[in-house]
Image (tube, helix red, strand yellow):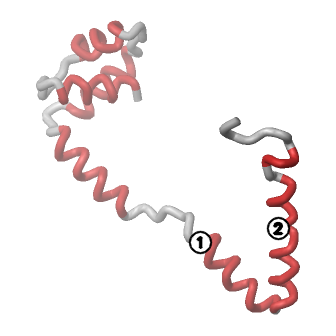
Amino acid sequence: MKHLAAYLLLGLGGNTSPSAEDIKGVLEAVGIEADETRLDKLIEELKGKDINELIAEGSSKLASVPSGGSGGAAVSGGAAPAAGGAAAAEEEAPAKEEEKEESDEDMGFGLFD
């Protein structure tokens, strides 16, 4: 990853086809030793390719990857009506007690004191 980051930094600086020596120079400037095998593989893979096109292609592939996050809310929302109103009321009561326990009054100081 560090090799790719150095390659991209060189690209941003105007070097459209950085060499292995260019990348080594960037890495050595920040005290990182380059791994020759990984560096050679990176140069081989990116040789003759436009980095902007590769980023655009990768972005389109990334857009098709499902990213969870909303799945959990749908499941819990569907389970509450099936359990009934009493279960929902029981779930709310402990939440209110937790808020009291976490208040700043119990600790004797506030965030901005």
Question: Regarding mark 2 in the picture, which secondary structure is present there?
Answer: helix
**Residue 54 occupies which quadrant of the picture?**
top left
What residue would you read off at disc 2? Answer: 96
The quadrant where residue 112 appears: top right
Q: In the rendered image of this protein, does residue 84 appear above or below residue 92?
A: below
> What residue is disc 1 on?
71
Which residue appears farthest toward the front when viewing the image? Answer: 113
Q: Position of residue 97 (x, y in %)?
A: 87, 64
Up-down: is 62 above or below 15?
Answer: below
Quick one: label 2, few (<14), some, or many (20+) residues within 10 Å? few
Q: Nearer the viewer, mark 2 or mark 1?
A: 2
Q: Name the residue at 74% across, 84% down.
A: 79
- Amino acid type, mark 2: Lys
Q: In this view, does 31 lie to the left or right of 71?
A: left
Along the line of sight, which residue is nearer the eye, 47 or 64? 64
Measuring 30% from the left and 23% from the top, which residue is drawn there? 6
Q: From the viewer's side, name the closer residue of 92 and 62.
A: 92
Judge from the rendering whether residue 19 lies leftward or rightward of residue 95; answer left or right.
left
Does label 2 or label 1 sit earlier along the sequence?
1
At x 39%, y 24%, the residue is 2
- Residue 40 lies, in percent from the top left, at 31, 21
Neighbour tally class for label 1: few under 14, some 14-19, many 20 plus, Cα within 10 Å = few
CB-based contact (under 8 Å), mark 2 and mark 1? no
Please tell me the numbered disc located at residue 56.
none
Q: In the image, what residue type sits under mark 1?
A: Gly
x, y percentage for residue 73?
63, 73
- Residue 103: % across, % down: 80, 52
Q: Distance between the residues labelled 2 and 1?
A: 26 Å
| Mark 1 secondary-structure assignment | helix
| Closest to the observer, 91 or 60 | 91
- Residue pictured at 81% horizontal, 67% vertical: 95
